Amino acid sequence: MATGIKVICCIGLAVVLTAVGASAFSGKSHSGGKNDTVLQYVINNSLREHPVLTKLRLRTLEDPWSIMMVSSEQAQLMANLIRLINATKAIEIGMYTGYNALSMALAMSQNGSVVACEIEDTYVGIAKPFFKEAGVEDKIDVRHEIAMKTLNELIAAGEAGTYDFVFIDADKFNYDRYYEKSLKLIRTGGIIAVDNVLWSGKVVNPAPNDLTSQALDALNKKLHNDQRIELSMLVVGDGLSICIKR
């Protein structure tokens, strides 16, 4: 008889946003879904946003590329996943202005840490003052370099299998490479969250000249058949796949 027993509990999460006569997919609350009354009801009756997160969200909305920001409802979902698994080590691949990195850091205990990958000077400059204001600047390690370089450095440093949570939200053509590196870095039972998996619905029969949608569709099909993970694809934000490493 074995001397030890391992019990792995898998919790399924389902998020369904529906509207009468409309598709269940409406997009992010600050962009495509801002006129969706059901989605706004969800926001008004569930969002619990830290004051500094609110300030950063409003600042980010001034940026012409604010559509890239993780929606507040999605960031809160991922923060709750971090709480659920007691995550203390996370990676964000594609920080943008730092809304989600800040959300994750705030959800972690005092000894938590977030490695945030971002190559754009402007976005790093926007993010850091808000990290400081929220009192979590020491918990967020901004890696101002190509994300693949950072991931390779972490693996080379012996950190494979030590991370609890990874969020992938950078250039779509490298998603598959980011996913494979993340699988090496994440622990068993850890979560890889993959953003933009619905890509405004364009992943459904992607056009022949739409290489981004084709790449995302290929990854979605790969994840569906990947026996290394448990999987749920959620209709939240621009589509979010939750991958739990077996």
Image (tube, rainbow, N blue to C red):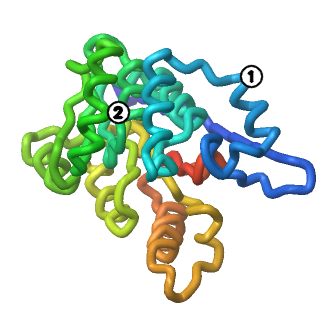
Q: Residue at x 26, y 54 (%)?
A: 181
Left/right placement of residue 11 relative to residue 168 reads right
Q: Could you tell me if the residues under marks 1 and 2 are in contact, i.e. CB atoms within 8 Å?
A: no
List x then y, in percent, for residue 17.
76, 43
- For the point 20% across and 43% down, which residue is it? 160
Which amino acid, mark 2?
Asp
Residue 83 lies, in percent from the top left, at: 47, 21
* Kind of residue at badge 1: Asn
Answer left or right for 153 relative to 124: left
Q: Residue at 81% of width from left, 39% of height from top?
A: 37
Provide the residue designation for mark 1: 45
Judging depth in this view, the residue of 218 and 203 nearest the camera is: 203
Q: Which residue is rendered at x = 36% and y = 32% of the image?
A: 101
The mark nearer the N terminus, 1 or 2, is 1
Q: Residue 41 is drawn in which quadrant?
A: top right
Question: Which sits in the foreground, 36 or 166?
Answer: 36
Q: Is residue 200 left or right of residue 163?
A: right
Q: Which residue is mark 2?
A: 164
